[in-house]
Amino acid sequence: MENFVVYKVIGVLILAGIGIMWLSVQISNSSAKNASKKVVDNLKTRKLSFESLAESLGMNIRVKALNNSFNINLFNSHLSNLNGKKLLDKFTIYWIEKSSDNKTIVIGEALVKEFIPTSESYSKEVDKFYPCWVFINIDELTKEITFKSSFPSDKEHQYLLEDLSDAIYEQCIK
């Protein structure tokens, strides 16, 4: 009888731990999803300026060379076409804003699948959202394009920012 009570307590603790993990994923998803949409709304209403957001996106993600035949107008045309689209089946682009000096901010979101344990031998697949905000600076003198963002929340977020930068580069430098 005593062992039965111990097993029951252990079972309850495991279920509580699983519940806490599930809840933390849900809270993280909610804040990530709302963060991107809130930034877009603030940019649209000018509560947040392009310059202040660009300044906060200061961590280098990628620096890529531009070839001699690079055409800024063609790049901007391809970039504009990404607005509202999905890239690599995991990124959604919500907003693209350009400044007059070849600088651009892309506000997007990544959706990845994550598995959380639900019992000893089972796990549940859940959606996990990451805000992906990228500042793009094109320097035609040095023939470089720089992708910057804020500090990623974890390693997965870092990889997603790199993947988004690469996808934008591939889509716009054709």
Image (tube, rainbow, N blue to C red):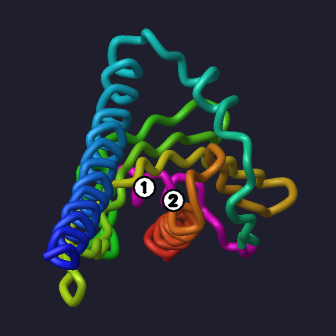
Nearest to the observer: residue 89 or residue 174:
89
Magenta segment: does it hold 75?
yes
Local packing at callout 2 (Cα closer than 10 Å; few below 14, some 14-19, many 20+) is some
Residue assigned mark 2: 75
Q: Position of residue 170 (x, y in %)?
A: 50, 75
Q: How many marks?
A: 2
Image spot of residue 108 (x, y percent) = 38, 49
Q: What residue is drawn where x is 31% and y is 22%?
A: 41
Residue 81 shows in this picture: no
Considering the numbered disc 1 on the image, is that residue within a helix, a strand or a loop? helix
Q: Main secondary structure of the magenta part?
A: helix
As drawn, is 140 to the left or to the right of 137?
right
Q: Which quadrant of the view contains residue 95?
A: top left
Q: Position of residue 36 (x, y in %)?
A: 36, 37
Left-right relation of 77 to 136: left
75 vs 169, nearest the viewer: 169
* Secondary structure at numbered mark 2: helix
Q: Residues within 10 Å of mark 1 (few under 14, many from 20)?
A: many
On the picture, is 41 further left or further right than 140? left
Q: Is residue 161 visible?
A: yes
Find residue 81 and report its image quarter.
bottom left
Task: Compute the Cα span from label 1 to label 2.
Answer: 6 Å
Q: Residue at x 47, y 71 (%)?
A: 167
Front position in the image: 2 or 96? 2
Task: Inspect the image, locate mark 1, and give the three-letter code of the amino acid beneath it.
Answer: Leu
- Residue at the spot of label 1: 79
Magenta-tinted stretch: 67-81
Where is the N terminus found, in terms of image quarters? bottom left
Percent from the top left, x then y, of residue 153? 56, 51
Q: Nearer the viewer, residue 66 or 69?
A: 66
| Dot 1 and dot 2 residues touching (CB under 8 Å) | yes
